[in-house]
Structure formats: C-alpha cells, structure tokens
Amino acid sequence: MQLSTPLVIKLYHAYRSILQAPPTSPANMDSFSLHLLPEYTPSLPAPDYSSKLLPGEQCIQRSPCLSRGDAVSFTYREREMTLRLMDCREEDRHPYYGLGSTIRGEVALGHRRGVVSVAAKLEGRLYVSGQHSKGITFVAKERILWESSTPNEQCPSIMPLSMSFPTSYRERAQDRHFRLPPSFELSAPRRVAIVYTLQIIVTKSRNIMIGKNFPGEEVSMSIHIRYRPRVRPSRPVPNSFLEVKQCPEDWMENVWITEPAVDTGNAAFLARCHFFFPSVRVFTASEKIPFHLRLETSPLFLHDLAKLFLSHQNPSEIEHVLSVFILRQTTVNIPGTSFVHDQVLGRGQMMLHSSSSSKVVVSKSDAPVSWSWNGELRCEVPVLSTGFITGQISTADYIVLSLLLPPGELRPNLALQRAIPIRLATEPWIDRS
C-alpha cells in the first residue's frame, strides 16, 4: 500500500513536534498517567472456603495432604557412574518404595566419551536356595535415559531418571494377574527371597576413532531397593472387649466345636469355644488385638483328648488348656521345590475371668465347666510386609486357637487347632475425617 505525499508530510511534521516538545514535569506526568488509567470497578469479595461441611452438604471424596517429611536421598558411585535417588524412604539403609511409587533421581557419568546409550532397568525376582536358575522374574522394566542420534553426539553430564513400579504382573503359566509381591526373605527351612534391583547400563562404542559408533562394551551398576506396599486398617480396633455393648458391630464371634477324627469314648461332652475378636480383621502388626474367649467342656473330655493326641505327655502336667497366637504361613511351590513354613509372630496374654466356674485343670472329673478369658494379642517380631500371593509363593496370616497344644506350627489334624484368617497391616489406621 502506498501513502499519498500530503499524508507523509503531515506525519513528518507531527513527529518533529513531538521531539521538540519540552520535557513533562513530574506533576504533569502524574496527572497525565492518572488521566490515561481506565476506571476499575471494585471486585466482589471472595467466597469463604472451609473443609467443614455446611447443612445439606456431603463429602464425596477426601484426599489428605501427604507429608514428605520422611523423604531422604541416596547416592551411589561405581565405575565412574553416580546414581542419586531422591524423594524415597529408608529401611535398613536401603531405599524403599510403596504401591505404584515412582523412582526419581538422576544419573551422572564421569567419562562420557564414546557413550552411545544409557538405560535404567528395574527387576524383581524370586530366588530359592538350591535352584540353579536365575530365579523367577516378576517384573523386568527398562527405560532409555539417553541414546545418541548422530555418531559424534556427546552424552549429557546429568540425565533425569523416572520409573514407576507396576501394581501387578501377569503369570504366563496360569494366565492370570497377581499383585506385585513385596520384598520378602525367609531363612528356614530353605532360603527364599524376593529381591528388587535397579540397574544402570551404559553402552559404549567399540571404535570411536573412525567416526562411527558401534555398540559394544556395556558397563553397569546394580543396587538393591525395597518394595513395601503400605497397608492400613479400614477402621480402628476396639480397646477392649468391654466396649462390645456400646459397639457390637465392631466385634465378631467364631464358634469352634472339636470333632476328633477318632472316637474318644466320651460323647457326653465336647469342647465348645466361643472366640470374640474385632470384626475389622485387618490389624496393624505393632498394635494390640483384644479378644474374649469362653470354653465350655469338661476336664474329663480334655483328659481323654490329651491321652489320644498327646500320648507322650501326662495330661495333669498340661499348663495351658487353651492358647491363642498369631501365625504366618509361607507356602513355596515351584518345580523341584515345595514346602510350607509356619512362624509364630506373637502369643496372646490371657487373664481368667472372675465368672469362670472353676480353676482351669485337666482331670478325670466329668462335671461340665465354663472358663472365660480376656486377652490381648500382639506381634512380638518385626513384620515388614503384609500377606501376598503369587503363582509360586504366598504368605497368609492367622489367629490360631490351640486346644492343649502350645503355640507352634499348624498340625495336619486340626482337631486341636482352629485357624482364623486375618491380614496384618504395616501402617496404623488414620482418621481421615
């Protein structure tokens, strides 16, 4: 577009008049600036926000703020490689991660010449002593952190790392999905371990003198990490059985009647056990589990049971007629290896109730008796992981009632034992209200 000559002359004179104008005083400048400002209308006041519900409102979902006060960092150096892991938790001087957590960090190399790729690999395997294979793989996940696109491209000095744990894996032999099992170790009767490793793999070219990079030598570093999904009870555990009248829904009853496979010759009396315990059935391993127990039987029936199943022991020397304990059972079933291991995690402390009809004894008296106890259960050994199940290994937790037998492994003949499935949690209940 072309401008006419008169218009150009007018624009020129207007520009010269602006340049030759005297400088504006501060006072005039303020008035000039205020004159140019647009008029603003006052804004409406911001509404009041509160986490407390108003009448007629209901909470659909609440996501509490997670504290990262326990987050730490780890630094590993090996073969001119430096790996730094950040925002993780610590367990026995090892980094550990929860369900679906993300491994965050960075990788730095001391010598970058000739590097053609850098990768990170997350692996989880099951190892059993005596097995010559490399173990059974649950997860094998690899991420390329950097890869050269041209022959002379140099590797960066620092590369960010970000990899997430999968929450499940697919078992090909059974064609089904399982939850990714936690880190686990069992020392007897055979050593079994579920191990997770993070590996940094640096690939260098075989010949960097001719201007072409041919993948060749691999240098790697491997570290052990822990995978511990955090499990919490859905609601708190009652403090004692005294609260059963105020909150009966918080308790459940398990009735157990002994039915020996072999006739004891005394069918007049049986052993009937009423076991009351919290109905939540998910308990934090570090907290107590209250319970109430009532046994209805006769001393003579217990005497006959002892002679039948405990022939090596004098019935009158049995100290505890009934025991309560927490047991963890680990089952391993892989080709060439199959076994079950029982571990007693805690024994119940029981106090005979004043309403009991007589002293607890095993004798030849056929008079019916009723004994009641209030008690508490607590794990006496550290519990680092909750129960889990895979195609090759599983762990399950139980509250076991044991008649005449001391706490120990589950017997094939369960006439003297009752196993009640529970789940042990690794974290305490949190009030999210």
Image (tube, helix red, strand yellow):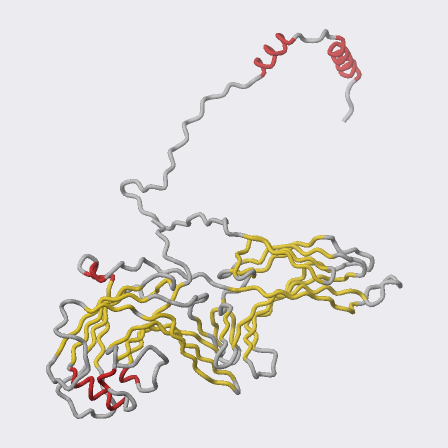
User: Is 159 located above or below residue 384 in the figure?
Assistant: above
Which residue extends farthest left? 367
Residue 49 picture location, percent across and down: 38, 37
Q: Quadrant of the N terminus?
A: top right
* Residue 273 horizontal/vertical position (percent): 21, 76
Q: Nearer the viewer, residue 392 or 35?
A: 392
Q: Quadrant of residue 51?
A: top left
Residue 385 percent across, percent down from the top left: 45, 66
Expressed as whole percent of the image width and height from the top left, the position of residue 73 reads 59, 53
Q: Is residue 149 left or right of residue 24?
A: right
Residue 385 relative to residue 258: left or right? right
Residue at 68% x, 59% y is 77
Q: Is residue 255 above or below residue 143?
A: below
Count of marks overlaid on the render: 0
Q: Residue at x 55, y 58 (%)?
A: 102
* Of residues 6 and 126, the one drawn nearer to the viewer in this rendering: 126
Picture quarter containing residue 8?
Answer: top right
- 152 vs 192, left or right, is right
Please report the residue visible at 15 percent of the width from the left and 67 percent of the height from the top. 354
Q: Residue at x 66, y 7 (%)?
A: 25
